[in-house]
Amino acid sequence: DTGVSQNPRHKITKRGQNVTFRCDPISEHNRLYWYRQTLGQGPEFLTYFQNEAQLEKSRLLSDRFSAERPKGSFSTLEIQRTEQGDSAMYLCASRTGAGNTGELFFGEGSRLTVL
Amino acid sequence: AQSVTQPDIHITVSEGASLELRCNYSYGATPYLFWYVQSPGQGLQLLLKYFSGDTLVQGIKGFEAEFKRSQSSFNLRKPSVHWSDAAEYFCAVGSDTGRRALTFGSGTRLQVQP
């Protein structure tokens, strides 16, 4: 069973650097989500893909953030010119497209620390 | 806009005691409700979900939740807590129209005393 896979699991970077996270969803899932989770908080929605189309973006996703899902399979989340406030756990989730009631399957997350 | 409130930030119970974690939601139409659990350093695992039908839903690990429309609540319960239940619990609400993502509460951290 290959669940949702995220890499790297932990990234430490200096302020101003760019970072990229990768998410490999469950293979038959055509919907992919990115969430951000800060300490003591629940996950906050960032963006959503259906196949390769990015259908929704949160206001949390500033111009420094960009997400792609070029072939409708894996996705990348890039943060440019990182700031200390970007330190968080970035969670990826996927689900099937059958109706709107399917559960989200989460990866273990990529933790970003900006020094 | 949909929202979820989990009033209890931190709960401590003794092993073997019963547990109830509170969740209140705000949503204009019929909500789809979920409870997820997160262990330290891990992703989120689904415990149970409610879409329609019987308002008492059973989940994994002996958990259940009851949907009460009149109170806009979806509280999570377990009759006897095990030490391995110590984790963070998140309630989430989704919808069948418009926004396709789930909205999560801020979570309740459960500690289990021996």
Image (cartoon, grey):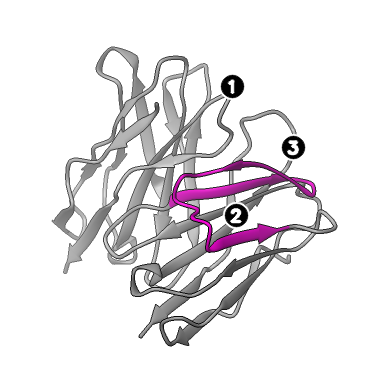
Q: Amino acid at mark 3?
A: Gly
Residue A101 against residue A68 in the figure, above or below: above
Q: Give residue A81's mark.
A: none
Which residue: 55% across, 61% down?
A: A65
Q: Is residue B57 left or right of residue A96?
A: left
Q: Are marks 3 and 1 on the same chain?
A: no
Residue A58 lies within the magenta run: yes
The answer to whether mark 2 and mark 1 are in CB contact below 8 A is no
Instruction: For marks 2 and 1, give the one nearer the viewer.
Output: 1
Q: Chain of mark 1?
A: B
Q: Chain of mark 2?
A: A
Q: Give residue A93's mark.
A: 2
Which residue: 40% across, 80% down?
A: A113
Which residue: 40% across, 54% down?
A: B37
Q: Main secondary structure of the magenta part?
A: strand
Q: Amino acid at mark 1?
A: Thr
The residue that label 1 is drawn on is B97
Q: Residues within 10 Å of mark 2 (few under 14, many from 20)?
A: many
Q: Is residue A29 visible?
A: yes
Q: CA gap, disc 3 to disc 1?
A: 14 Å
The residue that label 3 is drawn on is A97
Q: Amino acid at mark 2?
A: Ala
Residue B5 lies within the magenta run: no
Q: CA gap, disc 2 to disc 1?
A: 19 Å
